[in-house]
Image: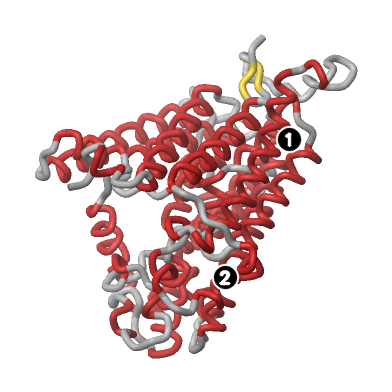
Amino acid sequence: MSSLGGFTTAGQPALELGSAAEISPERDLRTVAGRAGLIAIVLTGALLSLAALKTSTLLPQSIAVVSSLPALAGPLLPLGLHLRAGELLATLAVMFGGWIAVVLCADRLTPRAVILAMAGFLTVVLLAPPLFSTDLFSYQEYARMFFGLHVNPYTHGSQVLALDPLAPYIGDKWIRTPTVYGPLFTLLSGLFANTATTGAIAFSAYAYKTIAALSTVAITAMLWRGARIRGVNPVRAVALFGLNPFVVLYAVGGGHNDLLMLVPATGGILALLSGRERASGALAIVAAAIKLTGGVFLPFALLAEPPAGGRTLRRDVLLGAAVAAVVSIGVGIAVFGTGLVQMFHTLSQVQGEGGWQSIPGFFSTALQWQAASHVISMLFGAVFVVICLRLLWRVRSGELDWIDGAGWATFWLLMATSSILPWYVSWMLVPVALSADRKLAKAALWFSAWVMLSTAIPYIPHGPVILGFQT
């Protein structure tokens, strides 16, 4: 029987494969490939972390141009090295290839090896300066706007703090954009609102990175437990998420709140698998209160088949979600007023801007018809809605497992979104890690490959222009 990352063709766990009694690791090419993948991920992670300080394409644009970089450089400042475009592309390719090898050969790897590799990968990325994105500076600025100046971040962009020490660090695209994050995250970010000095800015930046790293550890721990409950390979589950370049290099490296959002989202899935239905519904709403995407799993949890059989709406899941929603919306409106509703309009505007890296954006660019962008986005959105309704119906009728359904829904959400960023891949990895659906796993790997390719093209000098994506 063939296998994919620890699953047999029948979809059963293959933990017993690769034991010393059956297979000699020295002669097993898949064992060698998996171990080589682990080494490649850690080494390339260390190389990129060292290179970030002197390779401007690895840094957020605002850090690359401000004079206070040493405060954000961290302990690797004396060790920086420069990577040219070809070297950077090769390093990213080796890292991504290493992750693919580890996922496909997870049944030949020990938990200890995978966990040590993840620890090493997280450590070297944590030591690096903030990578790729300016988002963590926007988190600080929105908090400073509200808690420092009492300006509503849901109705105003950061241009109101033009003279603030944080202003030079905000990405050009986001200066006039109000926040699109949930009220719970905006309130929590108040802990890092005191950014009056460069040192405080640097401290907050590394704090967000640390939160992202700890979130990754928490998620992988829950995935391990969830995988054992589901009867799938927990080593594969941990490798799929905890060693993914988009999770560690991009999401942790950039301190993104997507990982914090996935903690209650994953906790909600695990709670339902453990029979704690009210907690499951409540945690799904908590995830959405951090970032709206966190609620994508809830409809499938509501229709999940109860252990005792019968395919009715899970009332306790709904009750937990309803109570949490009333509390979160009530607190959000009490603190931020009706301006909170503006978040949906802002999110629509941000998504409307799109980008050729997304699937709808790619087709719009390929047609070379600017007016087609809006039509294609609407078409993909309509297809996503139809697919989700079909998936929900199949879950309700018992034809499809609810976690598999949530995984496919998240996959099609990413396919349909008009603006895709590398760390968004983390959204679908949680249900994929707990799924026994080999087709879903393959779809996730192919989509990850597309995101890596589209992410790498801008590193090629004039790459987007040469390929016709920009003029």
Say above or below: 291 vs 38.
below
Report the side of 223 relative to 286 (left or right).
right
Dot 2 falls on a residue whose secondary structure is: helix
Q: Neighbour class for label 2 at 10 Å: few (<14), some, many (≥20)?
A: some
Question: Could you tell which of marks 1 and 2 lies nearer the N-terminus?
Answer: 2
Report the side of 11 relative to 90 (left or right).
right
Provide residue 340's location: percent of width, then percent of height.
34, 71
Tell me what residue is drawn at x 57 percent, y 52 percent. 48
Res 36 → quadrant: top right
Q: How many angstroms separate mark 1 from mark 2 (CA)?
A: 40 Å
Res 156 → quadrant: bottom left
Depth check, front residue: 31 or 5: 31
Tell me what residue is drawn at x 66 percent, y 56 percent. 124
Q: Neighbour class for label 1 at 10 Å: few (<14), some, many (≥20)?
A: some
Dot 1 falls on a residue whose secondary structure is: helix
Report the side of 29 relative to 142 (left or right).
right
Residue type beneath disc 1: Arg
Tell me what residue is drawn at x 46 percent, y 28 percent. 443
Provide residue 171's location: percent of width, then percent of height.
35, 68
Whether residue 233 is visible here, answered yes or no, is yes
Q: In the image as oriented, which residue stretches furthest toward the top? A: 1
Q: Which residue is mark 2?
A: 73
Depth check, front residue: 302 or 443: 443
Whether residue 319 is visible here, answered yes or no, is no
Tell me what residue is drawn at x 50 percent, y 56 percent. 258
Depth check, front residue: 134 or 152: 134
Provide residue 15's location: percent of width, then percent of height.
76, 25
Provide residue 229's location: percent of width, then percent of height.
71, 36
Residue 174 image label:
none
Residue type beneath disc 2: Ala
Q: Which residue is mark 1?
A: 228
